[in-house]
Image: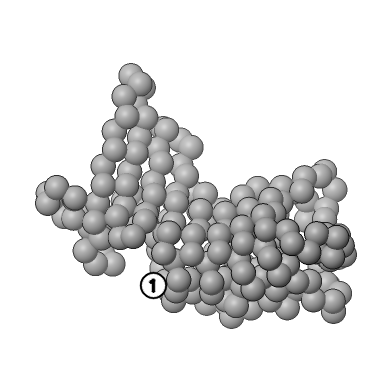
Amino acid sequence: MNDTSSFEHELFALVSQAFPYLEKLYVYNFQAQKNKQHSSTLIVFSHLVKLILSAVHVDYAEQFLFEKNTRLPRLLELTIEYETLAIVTNNFTNDAARLNCVNLQNIHIEGSFVRPESFHHYFPLLIGGCTFDRPLLGEFYSYENGLETHTSLKENGTVDRRSYRRESGAGATRKDGGDLLVTQDLGHC
């Protein structure tokens, strides 16, 4: 969904009713919602498994992640900017969004960050891991099943790919057994 005017709660209610088997929803809108006091009507997307909120005003993240507004019982994958996610979850301490996030198995985070301690408590089922997109310098970070991979495209056209195995929350070792590296320098999940 993409528009130049704001999307209100009622529009998402209509979408959920008109498309009851909707599995993937992409919302693109930087306009703040005009009616911040959502109606008492709970919206349910009972089959939605993938939600993309990568280019949205924080209001839409609240609309979808706060269980008082929208219920997403099958949500498995979320794409969102880190700053928006941190605001909505109050740095992963806000219970209002926890229920819609508890079943997530994959999160695609736009922007780098250092994972706070509460991150994995908030997202206990991350099995596919997190993906970090850093558009600057042609870098791409991914984390999957304990293996962190850093891929960068160099100016000469070569691709540099390095993988790291997480040893603890504070650091990681190189896959080839090399020196200990601090994962927060790379961004991690």
Q: With 105 as the anchor, is 12 left or right in this view?
A: right
**Is 142 rendered above or below residue 40?**
above
> Colour scheme of this structure image?
one colour
Q: Which residue is mark 1?
A: 117
Number of numbered discs present?
Answer: 1
Q: Position of residue 62 (x, y in %)?
A: 69, 66
Q: Position of residue 2 (x, y in %)?
A: 77, 45
Q: Position of residue 92 (x, y in %)?
A: 51, 72
Q: With 30 as the anchor, is 181 left or right in this view?
A: left
Q: How busy is the neighbourhood of tag 1: few (under 14 within 10 Å), some, or many (20 plus)?
A: few
Does residue 172 show up? yes
- Name which quarter of the figure residue 25 lies in: bottom right
Q: With 74 as the anchor, is 129 left or right in this view?
A: left
Q: Residue furthest front?
A: 21
**Is 176 rendered above or below residue 77?**
above
Pick the residue in front: 119 or 91.
119
**Is 83 rendered above or below residue 5?**
below
Identify the residue at image location x=63%, y=53%. 52
Q: With 54 as the anchor, is 93 left or right in this view?
A: left
Does residue 114 show up? no
Q: Quadrant of the C terminus?
A: bottom left
Mark 1: amino acid: Glu
Identify the residue at image location x=50%, y=58%. 107
Which type of secondary structure does the marked residue at label 1 adopt? loop
- Name which quarter of the figure residue 57 lies in: bottom right
